[in-house]
Image (cartoon, grey):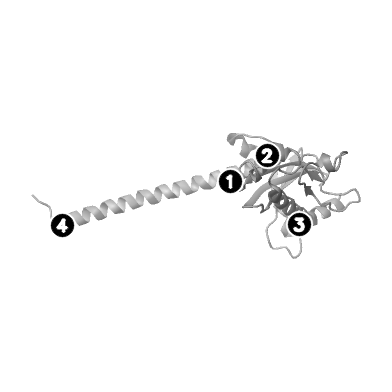
Amino acid sequence: MRKGDTYTLLFALVICAVCSIVLAVAVSGLRERQQLNIELDRKMNVLKAFGVTAGPGEVQELFERHISEIDCSDELAGVEEAMPLYLWSEDGRVTMYAFPVSGKGLWSTIKGYISLKSDLDTIQGITFYSHGETPGLGGEVEQDWFQEQFQGKRIMSDDGDLARFLVLKGKVSDRWPEGNPHAVDGISGATMTGKGVQNFLNDEFERYNRYFAGLREGE
């Protein structure tokens, strides 16, 4: 028996409804998975800034054992924007601090994390994990050779003030043969990216140093 147009229309509507439900469930499930992956990536990059390499299965355990997170802005007058700070503890004692850094490079916003040792002066490590800079030029900010230069450098001057940190056009050794604790080599052919990194790092150092100054005074 030939089915009429009404049956065809109802059948099509049912198929559309079922497909919509299946799609909505899939999108919801994927969104949850995406959020979990974003959170995992955040924690892995914080660990990398601390100098710790961990597989996906180790990240949560390391965070729970060693890392606590606070918002520095809660203790600073006149600061409304959140200032996340990650504290790495060993045997109940804070041994490192890490915080996010970000700003304009040449073509994009560069995002990363940097960590300081317990003296709140010496850089433990840095990682840049998100950018849209030119591969082989400004994109070198993501390479180990560039990031490893920061290890052991200092953000404070000998007189106790915040130093001006430099990402040079060229090499530190060419300008200061004896070295400079507040400067790293730039990236050949990417002067503007280096200048951007220099500028936003100094901005972040100044912003967070308001909180660190209180910690130093309390020692």
Residue 31: percent from left, percent from top: 48, 49
* Amino acid at the residue labelled 4: Asp
Residue 135 tag number: none
Kindly give the residue lying farthest to the left in the view shown: 1
Which comes before the other along the chain, label 1 or label 3? Answer: 1
Residue behind mark 4: 5
Q: Can see residue 139?
A: yes
Q: Please name the residue shown 66% across and 41% down the image.
A: 140
Q: CA distance from mark 3 to mark 4?
A: 69 Å
Which comes before the other along the chain, label 2 or label 4? Answer: 4
Q: CA distance from mark 2 to mark 4?
A: 63 Å
* Amino acid at the residue labelled 1: Glu
The residue carrying pointer 1 sits among few (fewer than 14), some (14 to 19) or many (20 or more) residues within 10 Å by Cα, namely few
Residue 19: percent from left, percent from top: 32, 50
Residue behind mark 2: 48
Which comes before the other along the chain, label 2 or label 1? Answer: 1
Residue behind mark 3: 207
User: For the residue labelled by badge 3, is the local secondary structure a helix, a strand or a loop?
Assistant: helix
The residue carrying pointer 4 sits among few (fewer than 14), some (14 to 19) or many (20 or more) residues within 10 Å by Cα, namely few
Q: CA distance from mark 4 to mark 1?
A: 51 Å
